[in-house]
Amino acid sequence: MCSASGGAHEVAKSRKDLAQAAALVAALRESAPFAFADAMADASARGREGWAKPIERSLSQIGAGFP
């Protein structure tokens, strides 16, 4: 019954979450670039499918890819 409004809500929430992530990544890269690199290395070490791949996909969505 609420699928139409629920879908719009999910899209809006996703956009908000991605905007927040972009701001956090930008701030971390500026203030502590090694901390960002360490966090990415840690995520990669925890497994490609479980952590690294979803993080890479999200970074790509906000235009903040990680080499």
Image (cartoon, rainbow, N blue to C red):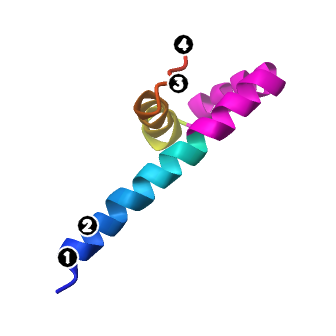
Q: Which mark is residue 3?
A: 1
**CA distance separating discs 1 and 2:** 6 Å
Q: Identify the residue at horizontal 47%, vertical 33% (top origin).
A: 62
Neighbour class for label 2 at 10 Å: few (<14), some, many (≥20)? few
Q: In which quarter of the image is residue 21?
A: top right
Give, as a three-letter code, the residue at label 1: Ser
Q: Badge 4 is on which residue?
A: 67
Badge 3 marks a residue whose secondary structure is loop
Res 14 → quadrant: bottom left
For the point 43% across and 60% down, which residue is it?
13
What amino acid is labelled 4 in the image? Pro
| Amino acid found under the numbered disc labelled 2 | Gly
Q: Which mark is residue 64?
A: 3
Q: Please name the residue shown 16% across and 86% down the image.
A: 1
Is residue 40 found inside the magenta-colored segment of the image? Answer: yes
Alpha-carbon span between mark 1 and mark 3: 31 Å
Q: Which residue lies furthest to the top in this view?
A: 67
